[in-house]
Structure formats: structure tokens, C-alpha cells
Image (cartoon, grey):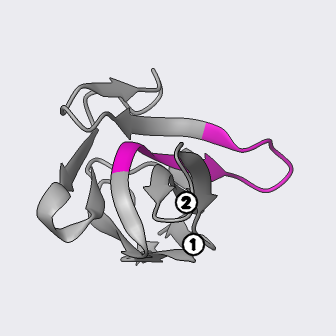
């Protein structure tokens, strides 16, 4: 069993900052790619940022330059630092990770339950 638990969401004013965290726990052997997706009301879930286990990052055009993804492999944790937040960043943010467990020889995708970020004055 693997769990991904997000934290750090909340209400913030436009131009403000938030830092999201996502910790993976369970029978983990290896964690490969990790990422943050977001889903605004009425929209599909979309990738915001991702990071490989080697530290290579990828960002959606809409967040590049404002968001920074990072990870602490020793803690099985991925972070998303969000600066210069805009109302259009309002969404539920989901953590995702490709994880190999003790039960399988290959990695599988796991998801957190999401954390709500609301950007409003």
C-alpha cells in the first residue's frame, strides 16, 4: 500500500505565495517521476509541473517562471513553491508519483486526494 498526502493549500490573495508538500509513504522501493496536477472547476486535470528522480523539471507554460517544483528523495516528498499567484491558479492540486513497491517489479502511478488552492481578494 502506498499513500500520497498533500498539504499546504488554502486561501491566498493575488500576488501571494503558497508552498505545497506531498509525502509518499508505504512499502516503497523506488520513486521515479513526481508531479503536481491541477483541476479547476469545469476543467480537465492538467499537469502543472513534474520532476524526475534525477531532478529534471518540466512546467506548464501557464506556471513557468512563477512555480518551482522540487523533491527530497530522502523524505519521499515533492514540493511546489507557487509565487505571484493569480485567480486563474485556483484549483484542486493533486500530487502524483510513479512508485515501485515491494509487491511489484515495475512502477505504478499513485495519486493523492488533492488540496484546494484558492486565489482571491
Disc 2: CA contacts within 10 A as few (<14), some (14-19) or many (>=20): many
Image location of residue 40, percent across then percent down: 71, 52
On-image quarter of the N terminus: bottom right
Of the pair 117 and 38, the residue shown nearer to us? 38
At which x and y percent is residue 41?
79, 56
Q: In which image quadrant can residue 28 be found? A: bottom left
Q: Say how many tags the image has.
A: 2
Q: Where is residue 53 in the image (x, y as percent from the top left)?
A: 26, 38
Residue 93: numbered disc: 2
* Residue closer to the observer: 41 or 30: 30
**Horizontally, is 23 left or right of 4 in the view?**
left
- Quick one: label 1 or label 2, which is nearer the N terminus? 2
Specify whether residue 104 is painted magenta. no
Q: Is mark 2 on a helix, strand or loop?
A: strand
Q: Is residue 16 visible?
A: no
Looking at the picture, does residue 19 appear above or below residue 85? below
Residue furthest out toward the right: 42
Q: Is the stretch drawn in magenta largely helix, strand or loop?
A: strand
Q: Which residue is drawn at 52% across and 76% down?
A: 3
Q: Which residue is drawn at 18% across and 56% down?
A: 73
Residue at position x 56%, y 36% from top? 47
Q: Give the range drawn in magenta.
A: 31-46
Instruction: Give the alpha-carbon distance from disc 1 to disc 2, as whole Å.
Output: 6 Å
Marks 1 and 2 in Cβ contact (< 8 Å): yes
Rendering coords of residue 89 (x, y %): 52, 49
Residue bearing the label numbered 1 = 116
Q: Dot 1: within a 10 Å radius of its alpha carbon, few (fewer than 14), some, or many (20 or more) residues? A: some
Describe residue 109's horizontal placement relative to residue 65 as left or right.
right
Amino acid at each position: 500500500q502506498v499513500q500520497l498526502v498533500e498539504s499546504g493549500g488554502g486561501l491566498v490573495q493575488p500576488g501571494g505565495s503558497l508552498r505545497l508538500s506531498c509525502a509518499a509513504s508505504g512499502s516503497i522501493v523506488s520513486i521515479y517521476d513526481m508531479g503536481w496536477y491541477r483541476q479547476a472547476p469545469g476543467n480537465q486535470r492538467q499537469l502543472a509541473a513534474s520532476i524526475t528522480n534525477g531532478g529534471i523539471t518540466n512546467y506548464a507554460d501557464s506556471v513557468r517562471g512563477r512555480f518551482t517544483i522540487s523533491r527530497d528523495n530522502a523524505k519521499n516528498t515533492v514540493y511546489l513553491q507557487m509565487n505571484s499567484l493569480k485567480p486563474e491558479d485556483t484549483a484542486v492540486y493533486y500530487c502524483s508519483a510513479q512508485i515501485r513497491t515491494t509487491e511489484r517489479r515495475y512502477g505504478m502511478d499513485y495519486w493523492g486526494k488533492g488540496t484546494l488552492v484558492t486565489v482571491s481578494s
